[in-house]
Amino acid sequence: MTFHSILFRTAEDRAKEDVREAPDHFADLNLDQIIDAITAGKEEYDLKPFFYAPSRDTETVAYRHDVMRDLEGPALRERIESFAQQMRGMRGHLSHASKRRHRFEKARWFLDAVDLYCDAVSRLDRDLFAADVKAQGFLAFREYLSAYARSDRFTSLMAHTKTLKRELSSVTYCVLMRDNSVTVRRCESESDYSTDVLATFAKFKQGAVKGYAVDFSDLPDINHIEAKVLDFVAQLYPEIFLELGAYCNENGDYADGVLTAFDREVQFYLSYLDYVSTFKRAGLPICYPGSSNESKDVHANDSFDFALAHKLLAAGTPVVCNDFFLKGKERIIIVSGPNQGGKTTFARTFGQLHYLAALGCPVAGRDAQLWLSDRIFTHFEKEESLDNLRGKLEDDLVRIHQTLQSATSDSVIIMNEMFTSTTASDASALAKRVMERIIRLDALCVFVTFIDELASMSEKTVSMVSTVAPENPAVRTYKVIRMRADGLAYAISIAEKYRLTYERLKERLGP
C-alpha cells in the first residue's frame, strides 16, 4: 500500500496545494468568514491553501470522508494531537536554536529538537499500531510510518541522539571564582555538602519563615560569562563537544518530509472537526454528503448557512434550517418573496454546501446529495466603484457577461437580486435573457429575484418562496419552501393583517 498524503489521494492531486488565492466567490458566499474561523489559531500550518482547492473526484472526496470519520474517534484524535504537540515543541526548539549566538548553545537546542522528533515518531508508531483505523489514508500512513520507524536511517538517528544526550549529561565541572578570575576544571570527587547543611539547620526551623534563596536566571539565552564557562567546559571534554558539532552537521535534514507533511495536512481535518463541533453541540445537524460528478440530482435537508449560524449561536439566537431538491431535468431554483426573508441566506447556503462538499468535508444538514462542480460563479450586488467608472446597471451586465462566458454545464451559478437599478420591465427583459443562457448551459443555478415569472420559463426551473408568519406578514419565518410564485401570497398576507381582503371589506361595509 503506497502512501502519498493524508489529504491528497494521489501524487497528482497534491499539486493543487499550491493554490494561494481564495476563489472569486468566497466573499459572496461568506466562505472567507468560514475559513477564517476554521483556521484561526493554526496560522503556523498555513492551512488556507488546502481550503482553496476543491476536487471533482468522487474518490478523493470519499478518501477524505473516511479519514475524517476515523478522526471523530476520541482515542485516535488524542494520539494525533499528542503527535502534533510534540512536533510543535520540536519546531519551537529549532526556532530557539536559530536565534542563539553561541555555537554549543545552538547545538544543544538542535539536539533536543531531534530528540523530541524521535520520541514523537516512536510514540505515534506505537499508538497507530494499536489504533482501530479503517480509512485507506490512515492504513497506508500506518504502514509507511512503521517501515520508517524501523529503517536504518531513523533507528541510527535515534540511537545517536540518545547516546549523545547521555554523554552530555555525564559532563561535570567545577567553577572556582576568586577576585576577578574564574577557573573551570573537572570535578575531583568533591563532596556535595548541601544536604548536610540543610539537615543541620532544619532543626532550627519554626513554622513558616522567610526564604532567602536566590533563583538563577532561566532566560533562554546565556550571558557572556556563561558562554565563556561553556567554552572552558568544551575544552575539558573535547571529544564530546566535537561529536556534538559533527552531529549537527550530519543531521541538518533529519526530519522525514512525508511525516512533516502529515503533521501539517492532518490539521485540515482537526480544525474542521473543531469548527463543526460547535454546531453539533447546539443540536444542529452535520452530515457527510453524497456527491457526484455525473448526476445533477441534488438535495439537502435541514441545511443552514455556516457563517450566519456561527454568529446566531454566539448571540443565543435560533438557527432556521431549510430544505431543497432538484431532480430529473430540474436545474434552476428561482427564489422569490419579501425582502429580509432569508432568500440571500438560502442562496449562500446552496453555494457553501457545494463548495465544502468538493473539499471532502461534512456539511450543514441532516442529509445531502451534492454536485461536484468545475467552478462556482456568483453575482451579488456590489457598490459602484470609481475604479471602473461604470454605473450599477452597466457593472451588472459586464459581470454577468463574464460569468456566462466562463461557465460550463458543470458549473454552479448563484445570482442574487440582479438589475435592481433599472425599471421593472427592463429588469424582467434582461433577467429572461440571462435565464435563457443558463438554461442552455444546463448548469445548476440559484436565482434570487423579484421577477416571479422567471420560475415558469422552463421545465428546468422550480420556484421557492421565502415565507412569512400567516398571522402577521411583518414577521419573517426565514423558511424558504418549494411553492408556486404568483406574487399574491405576500400581498394577501398583508391584506389579511389589515383586514383589507374582499371578504373582510364586505363584512365591514355590510349588506
Image: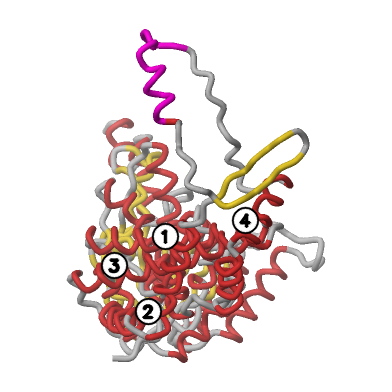
Dot 1 or dot 3: first in sequence order is 1
Q: Amino acid at mark 2?
A: Thr
Dot 1 or dot 4: first in sequence order is 1
Q: Mark 4 sits on what residue?
A: 233
Q: In which quadrant of the rendered image does the N terminus lie?
A: bottom left
- Which region shows up in magenta? 195-209
Q: Amino acid at mark 3?
A: Ala
| Percent coordinates x, y for residue 60 in the rendering | 35, 83
Dot 3 or dot 2: first in sequence order is 2
The relative height of residue 19 versus residue 226 in the rendered view (above or below) is: below
Q: Tell me how far mark 1 sits from mark 4, CA to CA.
A: 31 Å
Q: Quadrant of residue 244?
A: bottom right
Nearer to us of marks 2 and 4 is 4
Q: Tell me how far mark 3 sits from mark 4, CA to CA.
A: 70 Å
Q: Tell me how far mark 1 sits from mark 2, CA to CA.
A: 19 Å
Q: Mark 2 sits on what residue?
A: 155
Q: Tell me how far mark 1 sits from mark 3, CA to CA.
A: 40 Å
User: Is residue 453 in view?
Assistant: no
| Percent coordinates x, y for residue 302 in the rendering | 27, 58
Q: Mark 1 sits on what residue?
A: 86
404, 27: nearer the viewer: 27
The relative height of residue 156 versus residue 189 in the rendered view (above or below) is: below
| Residue in the picture at 25% in, 71% down | 128
